[in-house]
Image (cartoon, helix red, strand yellow):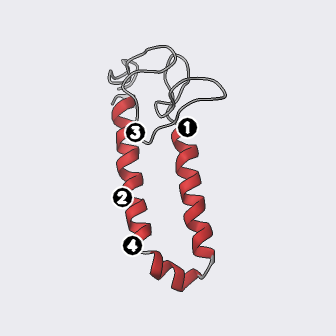
Amino acid sequence: MSLYKKAWLFVSVSVTVLAALLFGMPLLDRVLGTFSFLVFGLYILGQGLVAIAFFNCPQCDLSPFMGSKGLFSSYSIFPRKTCGHCGHGHTHSDLSEP
């Protein structure tokens, strides 16, 4: 499976879980109290860190959710088809994977 498809699968699962958290927030608030907002914030932060840390270009290790390498880079919730740094196409699957 290509990096682009893996990233879109991650986005779709993240949006589904986010919707479940948003609609389940009253129940979560009743069970956990004000701690539920901390859980929600940690979920949002964790999803951003996972997107940047575990989805990397095979050539230059740039996340498909980032625009370029550097201090001032643009981030997106949607993955890019080509790498912003080296131009590698993320839509092609790696031949080393079964």
The residue carrying pointer 1 sits among few (fewer than 14), some (14 to 19) or many (20 or more) residues within 10 Å by Cα, namely some
Q: CA distance from mark 1 to mark 2?
A: 19 Å
x, y percent for residue 62? 54, 25
Mark 1 to mark 3 CA distance (whole Å): 12 Å
Q: Which amino acid type is shown beneath numbered disc 2?
A: Thr
| Residue 22 found in image quarter | bottom left
Q: Quadrant of residue 93?
A: top left
Disc on res. 23? 4
Q: Which mark is residue 62?
A: none
Q: Residues within 10 Å of mark 2 (few under 14, many from 20)?
A: few
* Image quarter of the N terminus: top left
Q: Reading the chain from its start, which is encountered first: label 3 or label 2?
A: 2
Q: Amino acid at mark 4?
A: Phe
Which percent across, then down, holds residue 63? 51, 30
Residue receiving disc 1? 52
Could you tell me which residue is drawn at 58 percent across and 81 percent down? 32
**SS at mark 3 in the image:** loop
Q: Is residue 5 left or right of residue 67?
A: left
Q: Locate the C terminus and report the quarter of the image it occupies.
A: top left
What kind of element bears circle 4? helix
Q: Which residue: 35% across, 49% down?
A: 12
Distance between the alpha carbons at the discs numbered 4 and 3: 23 Å
Q: Position of residue 23 (x, y in %)?
A: 39, 72
Q: Where is mark 2, residue-wise?
A: 16
Which residue in the protein does label 3 denote?
78
